[in-house]
Amino acid sequence: MDKPYRWTSADVIRKIKYAAIRHFGEKKLKVGHAGTLDPLATGILLVCIGPATRRAEALQRSPKEYIAGVTFGATTPSYDLEKEIDARYPLDGVCEASLHAVLPGFLGEQDQVAPLFSAKSVDGVRAYETARRLLKAAQREGRVFDPGGVLQANRINIYELELLSWHGSIVQDFVDDGRGRIRVADVSGEQLPTAMIRVACSKGTYIRALARDLGEALGSGAFLSSLRRTKNGGFGIEDAVSLEEVLEMLS
């Protein structure tokens, strides 16, 4: 399905599970997804119902493709718009040509440190729980949030990177139905350069972390201002249905 903006993957599963249980009349019906999609991302979320949940792990291992909006000249603690901008950086040398030049260096197998604001487990604790504690401490002490050293790098693979377009300001072309519970930072007045990039990658790749690393590669800062998953294995966005269509099928 095409996950709505500002909905967590768990929100979607709860909504569909409730409808599926009523539709099939099975109280113990299993419903799950094959790969979490961030709340501020839209696009393909594979939802498995009943016996199909046995396929979730295999589906999760499939390659993914995204269209990412990467905004330069600032950072946020979450590397996306779930948190407000906390630092600004010079834009000297940040341009379409310089980004073209560094993209090839991000292709292939590499080690990537996940965003601290993620569901990754560290010693049995979700990383985002540690992140919230560290962020509050940084705000209390009046310093910039520094997530360094908490998470270990994971091996990932980026198969393709294509710069689709370059803009002088933040591009946000998603549809917000207003029902999502996740807040979004207001960047409507910001004039920061933004690149739209197609990313084909392996399981476990964090596009928010890629945005962070691209900013550092250009001697600046960067965060993810939009994200849409367009492929998951053999499933493309053109095949996806909306949440409303799913619920209508299960009514």
Image (tube, grey):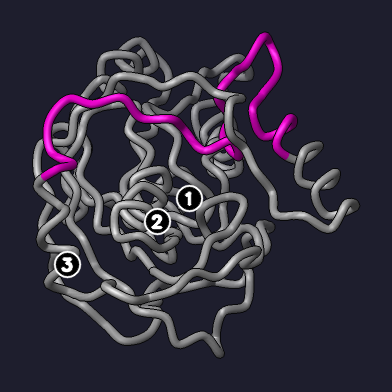
> What's the residue at 84%, 58% (across, down)?
142
Circle 1: residue type: Leu
Disc number at residue 98?
3
Q: Nearer the viewer, mark 1 or mark 2?
A: 2
- 249 relative to 126, above or below: below
Q: Quadrant of residue 63?
A: top left
> What's the residue at 57%, 19% (across, down)?
26
**Residue 147 pos. (x, y %):** 62, 37
**Residue at image mark 1:** 247
Query: Circle 3 — which element?
Result: helix
Q: Quadrant of residue 215?
A: bottom left
Nearer-the-camera pick, 190 or 26: 190
- 128 relative to 85, above or below: above
Circle 2: residue type: Thr
User: Magenta region: which residues?
Assistant: 105-131
- 234 relative to 98, above or below: above
User: Tag 3 or tag 2, which sits nearer the N-term?
Assistant: 2
Disc number at residue 139?
none
Query: Circle 1 — which element?
Result: helix
State the CA–CA distance, disc 2 to disc 3. 28 Å
**Residue at image mark 2:** 42
Q: Quadrant of residue 248?
A: bottom left
Query: Alpha-carbon neighbours of circle 2 within 10 Å: few (<14), some, or many (≥20)?
Result: many
Circle 3: residue type: Ser
Magenta-colored stretch includes residue 224: no
State the CA–CA distance, disc 1 to disc 2. 18 Å
User: Tag 2 or tag 1, which sits nearer the N-term?
Assistant: 2
